[in-house]
Image (tube, rainbow, N blue to C red):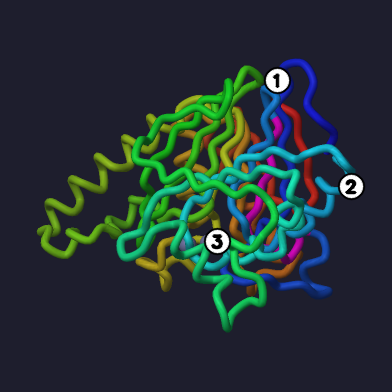
């Protein structure tokens, strides 16, 4: 993706799958790599998550920049493996001219830096993170609203096991919300350390409040990249697994007056035909809701321009 000029905001999907990479004949069209999205806006390169898709992004950046330095910001939503497993294979980390700032929040038991270092420690990987020649800097976030250059980034805790955030990127060219892993609040299942102490009435009240806050957070996004791992039928047997379903994704996007919904974090068991069917169902639901919501399925390699 060439460098951004003027006020356009561009994004490219490098990995769209949840849980584990699933290459093979059944996933050729939508792709088998795990979560990674590239955003170019206001002179910045912002990468969302470091699933296996980040490997291809790294090769593309090397080809584009040649001997020029690469300077980018990597925003991690959470440290489940499908969101960090590609980082050891990210070529720009191996170039001493490059600068990579890694943003994220500490988990409940261990810090972001400790976990990313841990996945490259002996015996899991031959090169330690601190031996990588690239200038890697951790930005351990404590605030939910910060700047990357001229770009404003807001974060919000999501309903997913462990500590997991969603990001909203607000730039001069428009806004993108990225919520790769999130269970809808509609089932009143809360992934919070204290939630077991709540009565059913209290749980329902908190879930409704949390949903209203999420709608506010997403309000008016140009693009919403959202966890839609399951069909509505599949979700019935996966309540509490931390992922979303079709009709709840469409209703969230509609309530937040989102312009375009991108169905993301495809289940590893779903082949291209299954995802086609899910996209069609979601488009029908959006049309029935009489909103102007556009819906498409996240496809590895897809690019779009905002504004
Ligand atoms: Zn995930
Ligand atoms: Zn996860």
Q: Nearer the viewer, residue 40 or 273?
A: 40
Alpha carbon distance from label 2 to label 3 = 33 Å
> Would you call the spot at circle 1 few (<14 residues within 10 Å), some (14-19), or many (20 or more)?
few
Residue at 64% across / 47% down in the picture? 135
Can you tell which mark lies on residue 207?
Answer: none
Query: Is residue 107 depicted above or below 153 in this figure?
Result: below
Residue identified by numbered label 1: 307
Q: Is residue 76 left or right of residue 14?
A: left
User: Mark 3, mark 1: which one is toward the viewer?
Assistant: 1
Q: Nearer the viewer, residue 167 or 266?
A: 167
Secondary structure beneath dot 2 equals helix
Residue at 66% across / 65% down in the picture? 88
Residue 194, percent from left and from top: 17, 59
Residue identified by numbered label 3: 229
Q: Can the viewer see residue 284 in this picture?
A: no
Q: Which residues are magenta?
A: 30-40
Can you tell which mark lies on residue 63?
Answer: 2
């Amino acid at each position: 993706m060439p460098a951004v000029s003027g006020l356009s905001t561009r994004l490219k999907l490098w990995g769209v799958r949840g849980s584990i990479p699933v290459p093979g004949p059944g996933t050729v069209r939508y792709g088998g790599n795990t979560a990674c999205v590239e955003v170019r806006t206001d002179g910045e390169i912002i990468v969302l998550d470091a699933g296996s898709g980040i490997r291809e992004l790294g090769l593309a950046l090397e080809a584009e920049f040649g001997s020029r330095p690469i300077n980018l910001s990597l925003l991690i939503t959470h440290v489940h493996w499908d969101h960090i497993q590609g980082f050891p294979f990210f070529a720009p980390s191996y170039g001493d001219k490059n600068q990579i700032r890694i943003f994220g929040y500490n988990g409940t038991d261990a810090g972001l830096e400790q976990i990313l270092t841990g996945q490259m420690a002996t015996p899991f990987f031959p090169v330690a993170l601190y031996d990588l020649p690239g200038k890697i800097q951790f930005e351990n976030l404590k605030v939910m609203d910060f700047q990357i250059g001229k770009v404003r980034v807001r974060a919000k805790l999501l309903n997913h096991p462990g500590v997991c955030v969603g990001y909203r990127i607000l730039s001069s060219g428009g806004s993108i919300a990225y919520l790769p892993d999130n269970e809808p609040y509609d089932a009143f299942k809360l992934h919070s350390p204290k939630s077991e102490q709540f009565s059913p009435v209290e749980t329902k009240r908190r879930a409704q409040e949390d949903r209203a806050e999420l709608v506010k957070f997403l309000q008016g996004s140009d693009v919403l990249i959202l966890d839609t791992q399951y069909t509505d039928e599949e979700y019935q047997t996966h309540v509490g697994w931390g992922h979303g379903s079709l009709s709840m994704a469409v209703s969230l996007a509609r309530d937040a007056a989102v312009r375009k919904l991108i169905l993301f974090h495809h289940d590893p068991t779903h082949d291209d035909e299954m995802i086609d069917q899910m996209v069609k169902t979601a488009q029908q639901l959006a049309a029935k809701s009489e909103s102007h919501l556009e819906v498409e399925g996240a496809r590895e390699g897809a690019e779009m321009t905002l504004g």
